[in-house]
Amino acid sequence: GLVLHGTAGGGTIEWFLNPASKVSSHYVVEQDGKVTQMVSETDVAWHAGVVSPTSILADKGNPNSFCIGIEFSRNKTNDNIMPDAQILSGLDLVNDIRGRYPHIQIYFHDEISIGRICPGPNFPKTLFRT
């Protein structure tokens, strides 16, 4: 699977590089479109959090162990309109991953951890799911 997130603020790369954070993601897509790989796709990243019992992955185990995580840099409330450069880079990244894993399913963090505001309002979910 592929889980898409919003960062709810800046400083994501620095936070992921800090071992005390105990969180990570495979990729970060900045608002200017820059993509940074933080963790190899073959390694586990700690991005999915707690799976809600009513989520679409509730009976699948820990999604960190089988999902690639992509964080999109967003404002603190995850509700900003994403710049075109960020959307286009994100779509390129998702399509590249889909090319390597043709049957990969796309999930949004709020579908896994019910009640989360992630990736947040104004995230173009339809573009990324099609």
Image: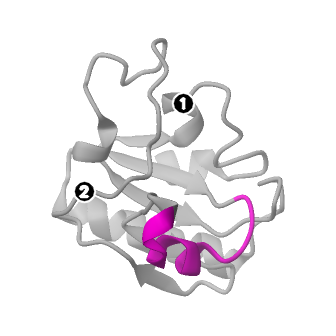
> Does 3 appear above or below 112?
below
Q: Is residue 76 visible?
A: yes
Residue 10 at what x, y percent from top left? 72, 74
Residue matched to label 2 = 44
How many angstroms separate mark 2 from mark 1 (CA)?
Answer: 18 Å
Residue 75 at what x, y percent from top left? 80, 65
> Does 78 appear above or below 58?
below
Q: Nearer the viewer, residue 36 or 100?
A: 36
- Does the stretch in magenta take in 4? no
Q: Nearer the viewer, residue 91 or 27?
A: 27
Q: Secondary structure at mark 2?
A: loop
Residue plotted at (40% across, 56% down): 69
Q: Is residue 102 left or right of residue 34?
A: left
Q: Amino acid at mark 1?
A: Ser
- Does the stretch in magenta take in 12? yes
Residue plotted at (51% across, 63% down): 21
Q: Amino acid at mark 2?
A: Val
Q: Nearer the viewer, residue 109 or 100?
A: 109
The answer to which of marks 2 and 1 sits earlier in the sequence is: 2
Residue matched to label 1 = 113
What segment is highlighted magenta in the picture?
8-20
